[in-house]
């Protein structure tokens, strides 16, 4: 079964350009990862600094491998100080 993930990020307003650059690299590298079926970044139009990652993985194992990747660890390290609050992550499988 595919694993679906929605991650909600809230960046401080003074870091928006830096955040977008970090996301560009993250999305580009992640889309190359085996098992990645979808990895899209959405920017909220009503709330400045709010970004949503929509992910879909072939299996939970492929997602686990992604979680250990250098490009994701690099993103997390750089984004940590730019975030307004802890990232919210929702994981599940499609019901219908």
Image (cartoon, grey):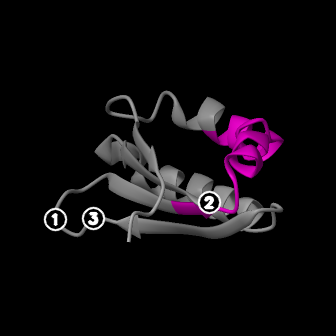
The residue that label 1 is drawn on is 46
Question: Would you place residue 77 above or below residue 38 in this image?
Answer: above
The CA span between labels 3 and 2 is 29 Å
Tag 3 residue: 44
Q: Position of residue 95 (x, y in %)?
A: 39, 63
* Label 2 vs 1, first from the N-terminus: 2
Name the image quarter holding the N terminus: bottom right
For the residue pair 42 and 16, the one nearer the viewer reads as 42
- The C terminus, quarter of image: bottom left
Q: Going from the N terminus, do you reach mark 3 or mark 2 first? A: 2
Q: Which region is colored magenta?
A: 55-75
Q: Residue at left 40%, top 36%?
A: 87
Left or right of residue 63: residue 88: left
User: Spatial distance from mark 2 to mark 1, Cα to Cα?
Assistant: 34 Å
Q: Does the magenta stretch include residue 84?
A: no
Q: Which mark is residue 1?
A: 2
The reply to whether the magenta stretch includes residue 73 is: yes
Calculate the distance from the C-alpha at mark 3 to the C-alpha at mark 1. Answer: 6 Å
**Mark 2 Cα-neighbour bin, 10 Å: few <14, some 14–19, many ≥20:** few
Residue 59 horizontal/vertical position (percent): 70, 54
Which residue corresponds to the image point at 66% horizontal and 56% vertical from the top-left?
26
**Residue under the image location 71 percent in, 64 percent down:** 36
């Amino acid at each position: 079964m595919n694993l679906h993930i929605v991650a909600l990020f809230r960046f401080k307003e003074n870091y928006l350009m830096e955040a977008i650059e970090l996301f560009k690299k993250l999305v580009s590298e992640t889309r190359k990862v085996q098992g990645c079926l979808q990895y899209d970044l959405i920017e909220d139009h009503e709330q400045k600094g709010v970004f949503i990652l929509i992910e879909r993985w072939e299996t939970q194992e492929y997602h686990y491998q992604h979680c250990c990747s250098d490009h994701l660890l690099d993103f997390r390290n750089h984004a940590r100080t730019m975030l307004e609050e802890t990232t919210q992550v929702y994981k599940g499988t499609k019901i219908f």
